[in-house]
Image: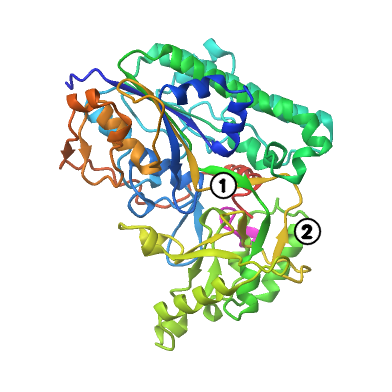
Amino acid sequence: MNQTKEKAFVLGLDGGSWDLLKPLMRQGYMPNLQKLCEHGVCGTLNSTIPPYTAPAWVSCVTGMNPGKHGVFGFTLKTGGGPKKVFVSSRAVKTPKIWHYLNEAEKIVGLINIPITYPVEKVDGFMLPCFLTPQGRTDFTYPLSLYEDLLKHTGDYIINVIIAGRKLDNDLQFKKFLDDILFATRKRFEAMKYLWTKYAADFFMIVFTCLDKIQHKFWKYLDADSPLYNSQTAEKWRPKIIEIYQLIDEIIGYVVEHIDNDTTLYIVSDHGFGPLEKRVFINKWLSQEGLLSLLKGKFYLTKMLARTKLQGISPLQRNISVAANPLMHCIDFPKTLFYGSDVYEQGIYFNHESPRLKSGDIAYENELNRLKEKLLLLKDPVDGGRFVDEVLFRDEVYHGPYVSHAPDMLLKMRNYSYLINTSVPLKEAGFCQAVKGAEGCHRLEGIFAAYGNGICQNKNIDASIIDITPTALYSMGLPVPKEIDGQVLKDIFTPAFQGTKEVVYSEKELVCEGEESKEAEYNSSEEVEIKAQLQDLGYLD
C-alpha cells in the first residue's frame, strides 16, 4: 500500500473568469477567494483550443490533449461521415487521475465532473455530471449513494433545467435564479456530507452555476458592456451576485476544513467574455461554392423547425437527434468543406469528396486556399478582420485521435464571434449581431492553489493539462510519462520541493474507453440532452 499521507482537493468552477471574479473581489463580494490568492498562488489557466467544457474537463482529469483522449466536444463522430452520437464517459480513451490514484490504493471522491456519466466503479464514490438524464436514481457509484444522500440533504439536483424556460418577466427571472441557488446549495451540502463520510485522499467537485449564469447574463455583470447599466441589469445584478457569494462561501468552507496535509486547487475549464456575433459559416461556404445543399431536404428541415414538429421521430424524418439536422441536407459529393458544431469552432474537409479521390484536388492545397480566404474576411460593420487565427488540427493536437477533430480550427475576435452551422434564409450576410446579454467562452480560465507546501502571494500561469501531473506530484505519486502536462513545481515552496522529486512512471494503465460508438442515451434522453446543450449555445 502507498504510504504517502498527502491529499488533494480540486474545486472546479466551470466558466470561472478573473475578468469577473477580480472586480467582485475588489468590491468585497468574494473575501475568501481574495484571502486565498493573497496567501497562496493564483494565475491564468489556459484551456484547450477551442475552450469548451467537454474537451477541457477531460484534459484536466487526464493531463492529456484531446488528440490523445479522443473527446473534442459533446458529440463523437461515428465514421467517415457527419453522423454523431452524444459523448459519454466511455468515450474517453485514456486513464483519468482517479485511475492512477486507485492504482496507488488511494480513495477518491468525485462530484459532478463533466463527462463522467455513466459512472465507473472506483475506490471511493462518484456522482456524475449534468449529462446524466433527469429522473434517474441508478446513476451513482456506489448504487446506494443517491438514496443515502437524500436522507442527509433532502434533495440533490443533477442539473437545473434551463431548456425551454422563458425569462420574460420578473417572476420567471427570480425563479430561474432561485433554482440555480438551490441546486448549488444542495451540491454544497452533498460535498460536506460526502467529504466527511468517505475521507477521500483525492476529492474533486465541479460547480457549474457560474457557467449557466454567464451564458445567459454576462453583459449584466461586465462593466464594459452597454447592457451593464440597463434597468434589467441594475434590478437583477444583486440577485445574480448572490450566486458568486455562495461560491465564495464554499471556498471559505474548504479552506477552513482542509488539514495540513492537503493541497487545494481551484480551477476552471475556460474563461468567459461577451458574445457579440454569430457567424453562419455554412452559408458563407455555400456562397463560396465550397458547400452544396440538397435543396428539397433543406427546405423540409426548415419547415419542420418552423412548425415545431420536433416530436416526429428521427426515423420518420431521417434526421438524427444527436447530429445537427443541417448535416443531412448537405450534398456531400459536391461539397469540399462544412462547418463544425459550435463547441468545435472549426471546419471539416470532406475526405470522401470524389474530387479528392480522383486527384483533381490536393488536401493540403485546399486547406491553405481556404485559410487565405478566411483570414481576408472583413466585418462589414467595422471593417476589421473576422478571423484572428486559423490553425490546422495537427498544429493543435497530437495523438491517435487527431483525425476525429475538425480539419481546421478558427479563432474569431477572441471567440466573441462564434460559428453557427445553420443557414438562415432571410439574412443577407453571413453573420448576425447578438443583442441579448449572452456570454461565451474564452481561453483564459482561473487557477489558484493553497495549503500544503504552496507559496504565498505568487502569480503563476498554467495549462489545464498541468492539473493532473501537479496533483499527483503533490500527493507524492509518480507522474505517468504519457501525460502531456507539466508539474507546476514553482507553485511549491523550496522546502516542499526539497522533500520530493518529480518521478516519472513508465507503467501504462490500460484504459482505452469504449470502442463501440453506439448511442449511450435512448431517444427521449437524446432529446433532453440536445435541448440542454442548445440552450447553453453548444448546439444550433
Name the image quarter holding residue 155: top right
Q: Residue 497: horizontal and vertical position, in percent?
A: 22, 28
Q: Is residue 235 left or right of residue 89?
A: right
Residue type, mark 2 in image: Arg
Whole-percent x, y for residue 50 in the image:
49, 53
User: Residue at (58%, 43%) from the top-left corner?
Assistant: 272
Depth check: give the residue in front, 24 or 250: 24
Which numbered mark, 1 or 2, is in the foreground of this view? 1
Q: Is residue 139 above or below residue 342?
A: above
| Horizontal side, residue 475 vs residue 134: left or right | left
Query: Which residues are drawn in magenta?
Result: 315-324
Q: Is residue 17 visible?
A: no
Q: Quadrant of the C terminus?
A: bottom right
Q: Cα distance, mark 1 to mark 2? A: 29 Å
- The reply, left or right, for residue 506 in relation to residue 274 is left
How is colour applied across the structure in the image? rainbow
Residue at position x 56%, y 22% in the image: 248
Residue beneath the point at 67% across and 67% down: 379
Nearest the camera: 101 or 145? 101
The relative height of residue 457 versus residue 211 in the rendered view (above or below) is above
In the displayed structure, would residue 15 be above or below residue 189?
Answer: below
Q: Does 498 lie within the magenta span? A: no
Q: Main secondary structure of the magenta part?
A: loop
Amino acid, disc 1: His
Judged from the image, the secondary structure of the residue bearing numbered disc 1 is strand
Q: Tell me the SS state at disc 2.
A: helix
Above or below 122: residue 273: below
Residue at the disc numbered 2: 306
In the rendered image, which residue does mark 1 sit on? 441
Q: Label 2 near label 1: C-beta < 8 Å? A: no
Q: Residues within 10 Å of mark 1 (few under 14, many from 20)?
A: many
